[in-house]
């Protein structure tokens, strides 16, 4: 059995988009989930990761309730976020999961 984000034997991840804003800053978005903004792509990525960590840890908090007006949640997105929360709760780095590169061993990182 695969992880919550598995879709038909493969792993689903939300679309990642990058855009330059009018003021020259960079916006990096996981479409319909979260985004990060910064003067460089690296800083926008750092902001995106920080925002995702806040979101996923809130989802895992006891007593978390969804507003009924939001309608049904997308199961793929929820599974992806749950997986990020699982990684973070074990002390792992979610970047490899968000940006699609393998987690490096401690000796290399």
Image (cartoon, rainbow, N blue to C red):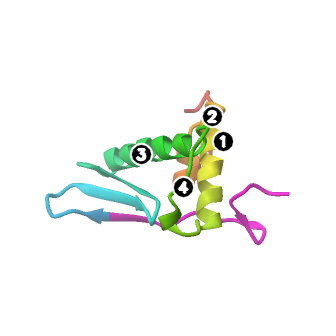
Q: Secondary structure at mark 2?
A: helix
| Quarter-of-image position of residue 63 | top right
| Foreground label between 4 and 2 | 4
Q: Which residue is mark 4?
A: 66
* Residue 89: numbered disc: 2
* Residue 49: numbered disc: none
Q: Which mark is first along the chain, 3 or 4?
A: 3
Q: Is residue 5 magenta?
A: yes
Image coordinates for residue 16, horizontal then vertical, percent: 46, 64
| Foreground label between 4 and 3 | 4
Q: Which residue is mark 3?
A: 51
Q: Which residues are magenta?
A: 1-18
* Residue drawn at x 63%, y 34% as measured from the top left: 89
Q: Quadrant of the C terminus?
A: top right
Give the distance between the C-alpha atoms of the residues marked 2 and 1, in whole angstroms. Answer: 5 Å
Image coordinates for residue 50, horizontal then vertical, percent: 42, 41
Q: Are marks 4 and 2 in contact (CB under 8 Å)?
A: no
Q: Secondary structure at mark 4?
A: loop
Q: Nearer the viewer, residue 8 or 58?
A: 58
Q: Is residue 47 magenta?
A: no
* Residue drawn at x 14%, y 58% as measured from the top left: 23
Q: Which residue is mark 1?
A: 86
Q: Secondary structure at mark 3?
A: helix
Give the distance between the C-alpha atoms of the residues marked 4 and 3, in whole angstroms. Answer: 18 Å
Q: Which mark is first along the chain, 2 or 4?
A: 4
Give the distance between the C-alpha atoms of the residues marked 4 and 1, in whole angstroms. Answer: 19 Å
Give the distance between the C-alpha atoms of the residues marked 4 and 2, in whole angstroms. Answer: 21 Å
Q: Which mark is first along the chain, 2 or 3?
A: 3
């Amino acid at each position: 059995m695969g992880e919550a984000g598995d879709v038909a034997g493969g792993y689903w991840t939300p679309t990642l988009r990058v855009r330059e804003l009018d003021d020259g800053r960079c916006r990096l978005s996981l479409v319909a989930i979260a985004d990060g903004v910064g003067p460089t792509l690296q800083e926008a990525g750092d902001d995106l990761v920080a925002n995702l960590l806040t979101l996923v840890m809130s989802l895992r908090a006891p007593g978390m309730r969804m507003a009924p007006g939001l309608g049904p949640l997308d199961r793929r997105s929820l599974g992806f976020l749950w997986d990020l929360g699982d990684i973070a709760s074990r002390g792992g780095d979610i970047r490899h999961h968000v940006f699609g590169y393998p987690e490096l061993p401690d000796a290399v990182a």
